[in-house]
Image (tube, rainbow, N blue to C red):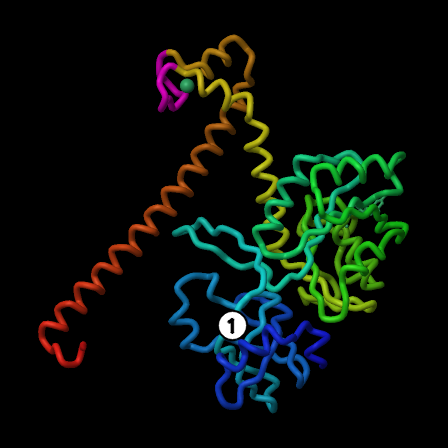
């Protein structure tokens, strides 16, 4: 396996020397499943787990390796296994907020050079959604490229491309058809040797079909097959970083797919604009829109201007957003108290043994 083809370059090389210990080698994470990793090395693919030390020093899930990461590993070639000791700095990362016990970030894809934002030119074409995905892309550190798929269904592709270019100045926009395999050079042109891409877009826009056409065989189930169980399993192989024959790689992890759902939730928030506007006219500034007098939202429901069920989902979403920010705040405060405790401890030690702490 050629590390350069896997994306190894002088940036990672420079950081490897700091991270590596004697006998360790560089590897890229190809697949992750329940903290069992498939990694690519110059000795081929190995199966890896993280070291106990990495496990213990990790302060959040973002400190664990993710698909696309470059890692320093100690190989055990006779077993085809390895132990991950450290993660090299990430040039870009896509994160997902995990809001289970506490709010933390989980990296769902790392070291993506180019992220392809896919929209369908069929009926779900939506400039505001493209803007939202662009924000996600800029945040990640990857370079965005916009793909307008299903060009075969669109009577005026040129107008659509111009429309999108107007909301995304400086971002390349390409019309493609994954089905008819036209315009694919709009993708391959951005994926030179060793470069990593990822696709982002709502479900049904043709992301799996696109990757399949690039790879030239059906490695991912597309909508038709998938709808049988609604899950989107990977069929012939579970790898999440796939090589493209014309050069480069594509990352497609389940986490990236959840990121797509997450972006859709954001759009839900956008669709409550009318309710938000009304909320600004309630009598009390901190109105919870449940029982307060002078609540503009309840009044609008009574007049039949707002649907009761839309109001319920608005409240639900508001609660979720609030919970998320409370958890974030608690976590920040906890960190601060811990820091103060450590400072106090050091001060006491200094008193007891001043020489040692000079
Ligand atoms: P994903 O959810 O984004 O991965 O979407 P899929 O790849 O599963 O595709 C969803 C549906 O769109 C499938 O029925 C595909 O056959 C269809 N599709 C994908 N690409 C194209 C295209 O370029 N043109 C047309 N007409 N249909 C497409
Ligand atoms: Zn109110």
Residue at 78 percent of width and 66 percent of height: 244
Per the image, the residue denoted by label 1 is: 87
Which residues lie in the magenta part?
Answer: 283-293
Please identify the quadrant where the N terminus is shown: bottom right
Predominant SS of the magenta segment: loop
- Where 176 falls versus 275 (above or below)? below
Horizontal placement of 204 versus 38: left or right?
right
Q: Quadrant of residue 142?
A: bottom right
Q: Is residue 103 magenta?
A: no
Relative to 39, 338 lies left or right:
left
- In front here: 195 or 224? 195
Q: Nearer the viewer, residue 142 or 274?
A: 142
Q: Is residue 287 magenta?
A: yes
Q: Secondary structure at mark 1?
A: strand
Q: Nearer the viewer, residue 187 or 119?
A: 187
134 to 357, vertically: above or below: above
Q: Is residue 233 above or below residue 239?
A: above
Q: Is mark 1 within 8 Å of ligand 1?
A: no
Task: Count residues near mark 1 (Cα–Cα under 10 Å), then give few for <14, some for 14-19, many for 20+.
Answer: many
Q: Residue furthest top?
A: 303
The percent coordinates of residue 353 (x first, y second) are 11, 78
Q: Residue furthest left?
A: 352
Residue 210: percent from left, percent from top: 79, 54
Expressed as whole percent of the image width and height from the top left, the position of residue 242 reads: 72, 66
The quarter of the rendered structure image containing the C terminus is bottom left
Q: Which percent across, then down, holds residue 61? A: 46, 61
Task: Give me the residue at 47% from left, 17% from top.
Answer: 297
> Which residue is at 50% across, 90% downward?
22
- The structure residue drawn at horizontal position 53% and vertical position 90%, both measured from the top left corner, is 23
């Amino acid at each position: 396996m050629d590390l350069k083809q896997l994306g190894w370059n002088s940036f990672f090389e420079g950081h490897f020397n700091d991270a590596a210990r004697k006998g360790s080698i560089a590897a890229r994470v190809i697949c992750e499943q329940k903290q069992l990793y498939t990694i690519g090395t110059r000795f081929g693919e190995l199966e890896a787990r993280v070291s106990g030390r990495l496990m213990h020093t990790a302060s959040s899930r973002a400190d664990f390796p993710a698909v696309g990461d470059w890692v320093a590993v100690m190989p055990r070639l006779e077993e085809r296994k390895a132990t991950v000791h450290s993660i090299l700095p990430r040039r870009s990362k896509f994160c997902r907020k995990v809001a289970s016990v506490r709010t933390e970030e989980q990296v769902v894809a790392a070291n993506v050079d180019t992220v392809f934002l896919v929209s369908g030119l069929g009926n779900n074409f939506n400039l505001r959604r493209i803007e939202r995905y662009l924000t996600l892309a800029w945040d990640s550190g990857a370079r965005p490229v916009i793909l307008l798929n299903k060009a075969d269904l669109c009577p005026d592709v040129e107008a659509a491309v111009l429309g999108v270019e107007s909301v995304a100045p400086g971002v390349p926009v390409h019309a493609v058809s994954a089905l008819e395999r036209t315009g694919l050079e709009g993708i391959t042109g951005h994926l030179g040797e060793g470069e990593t891409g990822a696709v982002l877009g709502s479900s049904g826009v043709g992301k799996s079909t696109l990757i399949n056409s690039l790879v030239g065989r059906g490695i991912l189930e597309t909508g038709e097959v998938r709808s049988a169980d609604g899950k989107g399993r990977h069929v012939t192989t579970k790898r999440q970083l796939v090589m493209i024959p014309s050069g480069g790689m594509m990352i497609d992890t389940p986490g990236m797919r959840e990121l797509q759902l997450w972006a859709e939730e954001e759009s839900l928030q956008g669709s409550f604009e009318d309710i938000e506007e009304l909320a600004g006219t309630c009598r009390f500034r901190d109105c919870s829109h449940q029982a307060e007098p002078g609540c503009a939202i309840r009044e609008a429901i009574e007049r039949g201007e707002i649907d009761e069920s839309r109001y319920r989902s608005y409240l639900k979403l508001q609660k979720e957003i609030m919970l998320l920010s409370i958890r974030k705040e608690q976590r920040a405060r906890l960190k601060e108290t811990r820091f103060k405790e450590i400072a106090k401890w050091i001060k006491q030690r200094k008193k007891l043994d001043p020489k040692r702490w000079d």
